[in-house]
């Protein structure tokens, strides 16, 4: 038995020393930790070197459970590569060699919180050399944005112990987030009887952490303006991040020590006609239930902390005092403010003379009393024409007549303005505004409308006459501040000259319209025939006759019978043209036969000079009884003057 034990001991020592020597032949290097977000892909590298080369290596991957048990998840040698079944990683892992660099990578897809474990890579060569490395996988989950909720009720400064101020909560983070409270950028730490922070950590069913922190304070009056918030720090791969909640304020109850009164609306300067709202409040919280407002200048008092003054005037200016009374001690606390109501009196416009005639200078002034600096502009026909409270015109014309509006504004207050208007009439003889054209063409017995616009004061009298002294009667008239417009309508029967006559006690003016009467007549079609092209073109033409009473006597438009006569002449001309064409064709045929020697036994070289001469003497006179033109045409289509007949 002793011999057996000794042999076992020697064998064990041999194995140990042999193993130590073998392991020394493989060196494995791995990262201490690999960090990854939940749901991402983790890659764990196992780098190794061996004195025996990379051929025939055996590779194992294991993970260590929370109970420190080692579980195999993968094996590979030169013949097989096997994933262990029924493990949390069976469907989510891949193993790849890194080429000739001596490395293998374990890839874990869709990493979960439970994957935060230690992973082991083991390498063994053909000689039995073994190397091993370990990496811790760290999994992170960014928490939701933190929330903060302050207490809904006020906190009294008279409380003896710290009171709950707010609660801060952050959910679903991994690993556990941390919460720090701040007051006005200053971190808060626990102080006995002054600051208390209570923390609560919850592990959700998903494995994520939710943390709640409650802040309790012994509040002071100064805390009413403080801002409270909490800061959450959490870990992510490779760094630590921070996020903050919104700022909140708390309601603190304390007695009043000061009273404030102010103009709530309008903001800025006040003008007459505004509605002014006065607010009064003491700095106690809650404020006193008995507050009154008093106008010192008038002695009028109002109960309550809000007073609305409607349609204020300059008489409402002055000092307003607010009084707050403590209902427990009956002590009064007062505050005051000054109110000034700006004003702008209605504008007054004056002309420096009773009447303005054409060519005269005139001056218009505009004044409006105001408590503010003002600006004045002058408007006419919707356009700004000048600035300043005095408008000067050196040489008046009819264009200067019309309504002038003076607009006075106080630029410091929007909507503070006043305006006044003045109608200025310019005295003068009539002046007719000339149109672009007074030459008018109208059809016979057409009704035309004529208009005439006249400026002048007194308002001119307008009459309409013709060149032969005929009065055209009553016309329609429209009177405006710029002048008078007159219009007539009459039927045109001949060339006419119409006069628009305007007069008043300062002079006269007139405008001449020349009207030409036109009559449209249709002549017979004019036909032109050219034997060269053997085409006939018939073009109807329309002639416009102008009736001039001075040079042309009255004419009568021919009735439709004239058209019948022209139509008959056209038929005769057409027959003549056809005959000429037939003769030309016949001559061409005879000439062709003659050249071929088939006519009267003659050869094609015989002289046809005589026949050609006879053809050239054939002419046709084309005469129209409308145009009284005669055209002589040779058989070959050449025109011949009449003296060649």
Image (cartoon, grey):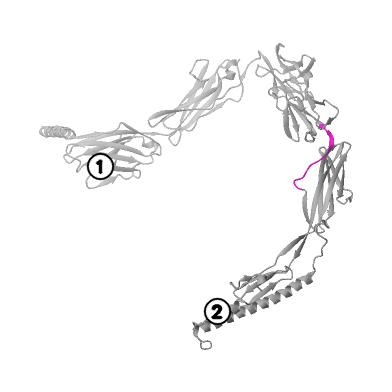
- Which quarter shows the C terminus? bottom right
As drawn, the residue found furthest toward the bottom would be 601
The 10 Å Cα crowd at callout 1, few under 14, some 14 to 19, many 20 or more, is few
Q: Which residue is mark 2?
A: 609
Residue 179 coordinates in the image, percent (x, y): 47, 25
**Residue 359 part of the magenta-drawn span:** no
**Residue 435 part of the magenta-drawn span:** yes
Secondary structure of the residue carrying tag 2 is: helix
Q: 275 or 71: nearer the eye?
A: 275
Q: 46 or 346: nearer the eye?
A: 346
The 10 Å Cα crowd at callout 2, few under 14, some 14 to 19, many 20 or more, is few
Q: 279 or 376: nearer the eye?
A: 376
| Image depth: mark 2 or mark 1 in front | 2
Determine whether, in the image, residue 441 is placed left or right of residue 589.
right
| In the rendered image, the vertical position of residue 567 relative to residue 477, given as above or below | below
Query: Which residue occupies 33% across, 40% down?
Result: 107
**Is residue 277 in sight in this rendering?**
no
Sequence-earlier tag: 2 or 1: 1
Residue 31 coordinates in the image, percent (x, y): 30, 32
Total count of labels? 2
Residue range of the region highlighted in magenta in the rendering: 423-437
Q: Quadrant of residue 118?
A: top left
Give the overall secondary structure of the magenta segment.
Answer: strand
Query: Which mark is drawn over residue 99?
Result: 1
Residue 233 coordinates in the image, percent (x, y): 44, 27
| In the rendered image, the vertical position of residue 24 relative to residue 155, given as above or below | below
């Amino acid at each position: 038995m002793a011999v057996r034990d000794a042999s076992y001991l020697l064998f064990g020592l041999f194995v140990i020393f042999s193993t130590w020597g073998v392991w020394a032949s493989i060196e494995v290097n791995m990262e201490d930790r690999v960090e990854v977000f939940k749901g991402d892909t983790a890659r764990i590298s196992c780098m190794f070197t061996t004195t025996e080369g990379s051929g025939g290596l055996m590779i194992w991957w294991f993970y260590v459970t929370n109970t420190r048990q080692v579980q195999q998840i993968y094996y590979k040698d030169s013949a097989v590569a096997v994933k262990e079944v029924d493990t949390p990683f069976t469907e989510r892992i891949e193993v790849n060699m890194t080429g000739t660099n001596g490395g293998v990578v374990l890839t874990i897809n869709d990493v979960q919180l439970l994957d935060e474990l230690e992973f082991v890579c083991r390498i063994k060569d053909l000689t039995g050399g073994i190397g091993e490395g370990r990496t811790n996988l760290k999994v992170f989950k960014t928490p939701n944005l933190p929330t903060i909720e302050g207490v809904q009720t006020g906190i009294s400064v008279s409380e003896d112990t710290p009171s709950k101020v707010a609660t801060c909560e952050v959910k679903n983070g991994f690993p556990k987030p941390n919460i720090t409270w701040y007051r006005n950028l200053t971190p808060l730490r626990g102080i006995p009887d002054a600051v208390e922070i209570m923390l609560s950590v919850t592990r959700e069913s998903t494995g994520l952490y939710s943390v709640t922190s409650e802040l309790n304070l012994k509040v002071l009056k100064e805390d009413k303006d403080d801002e409270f918030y909490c800061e959450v720090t959490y870990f992510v791969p490779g760094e630590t991040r921070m996020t903050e909640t919104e700022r909140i304020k708390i309601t603190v109850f304390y007695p009043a020590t000061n009273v404030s009164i102010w103009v709530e609306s309008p903001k800025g300067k006040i003008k007459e006609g505004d509605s002014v709202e006065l607010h009064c409040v003491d700095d106690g919280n809650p404020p006193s239930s008995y507050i009154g407002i008093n106008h010192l200048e008038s002695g009028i008092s109002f109960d309550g902390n809000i007073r609305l003054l409607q349609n204020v005037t300059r008489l409402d200016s002055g000092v307003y005092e607010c009084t707050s009374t403590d209902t427990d001690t009956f002590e009064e606390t007062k505050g005051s403010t000054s109110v000034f109501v700006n004003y702008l009196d209605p504008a007054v416009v004056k002309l420096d003379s009773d009447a303005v005639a054409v060519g005269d200078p005139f001056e218009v002034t505009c004044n409006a009393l105001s408590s503010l600096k003002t600006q004045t502009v002058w408007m006419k026909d919707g356009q700004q024409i000048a600035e300043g409270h005095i408008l000067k015109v050196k040489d008046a014309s009819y264009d200067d007549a019309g309504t002038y509006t003076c607009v006075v504004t106080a630029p410091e207050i929007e909507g503070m303005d006043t305006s006044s208007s003045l109608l200025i009439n310019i005295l003068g003889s009539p002046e007719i505004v000339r149109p672009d054209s007074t030459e008018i063409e109208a059809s016979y017995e057409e009704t035309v409308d004529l208009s005439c616009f006249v400026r002048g004061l007194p308002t001119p009298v307008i009459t309409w006459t013709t060149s032969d002294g005929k009065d055209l009667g009553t016309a329609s008239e429209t009177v405006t501040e710029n002048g008078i417009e007159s219009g007539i309508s009459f039927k045109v029967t001949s060339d006419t000259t119409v006069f628009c006559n305007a007069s008043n006690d300062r002079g006269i003016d007139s405008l001449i319209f020349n009207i030409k009467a036109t009559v449209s007549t249709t002549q017979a079609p004019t036909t032109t025939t050219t034997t060269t092209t053997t085409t006939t073109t018939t073009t109807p033409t329309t002639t416009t006759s102008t009736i001039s009473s001075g040079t042309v006597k009255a004419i009568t438009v021919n009735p439709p019978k004239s058209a019948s006569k022209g139509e008959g002449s056209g038929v005769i001309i057409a027959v003549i043209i056809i005959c000429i064409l037939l003769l030309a064709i016949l001559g061409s045929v005879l000439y062709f036969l003659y050249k071929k020697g088939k006519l009267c036994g003659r050869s094609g070289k015989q002289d046809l000079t005589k026949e050609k001469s006879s053809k050239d003497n054939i002419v046709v006179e084309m005469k129209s009884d409308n145009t009284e033109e005669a055209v002589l045409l040779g058989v070959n289509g050449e025109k011949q003057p009449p003296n060649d007949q």
